Image (cartoon, grey):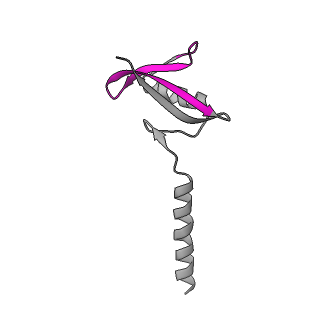
Amino acid sequence: MKKFIFTLWMFVALTVNAQISDAVRFMGIPVDGPKEDMISQLEQKGFTYNKDSDYLEGRFNGESAILSISTNKGVVDRVVVIFIN
């Protein structure tokens, strides 16, 4: 009985932990950290950061695009993709 309860408790603990640490991802990058981290990771994927206008330029889904990153209390909460036509 002790083994069953322990196994059940471990299963519940692992399941809850997996759900809590699961963040939304954009191009494989978690959308839950500082803006600077998101910018540097997107630069590694080939985007160019325009410091004056505060956006990134590059290719998204095979098309030219501008990415705008929004934050809430210093944490990234939104990435806006604008396709250039």
Q: Quadrant of residue 47?
A: top left
What x and y, as percent, mark residue 51?
A: 57, 15
Image: magenta residue range: 50-71
Q: Residue furthest top?
A: 52
What x and y, as percent, mark residue 29?
A: 48, 37
The answer to which of 84 and 4 lies nearer the viewer is 84
The residue lying at 66 percent from left, 33 percent from top is: 74
Is 36 one of the magenta-colored residues? no
Relative to 9, is 18 above or below?
Answer: above
Q: Quadrant of residue 63?
A: top left
Q: Residue furthest left?
A: 62
What x and y, as percent, mark residue 72?
A: 64, 35
Q: Quadrant of residue 60?
A: top left
Quadrant in the picture for the C terminus: top left
Quadrant in the picture for the N terminus: bottom right
* Direction from residue 20 to residue 73 in the image, left or right: right
The residue lying at 55 percent from left, 62 percent from top is: 16
What x and y, as percent, mark residue 62?
A: 31, 25
Q: Residue furthest bottom?
A: 1
Magenta: main secondary structure: strand
Is 68 one of the magenta-colored residues? yes
The answer to which of 76 and 82 lies nearer the viewer is 82
| Tally of numbered discs | 0
The residue lying at 57 percent from left, 77 percent from top is: 6
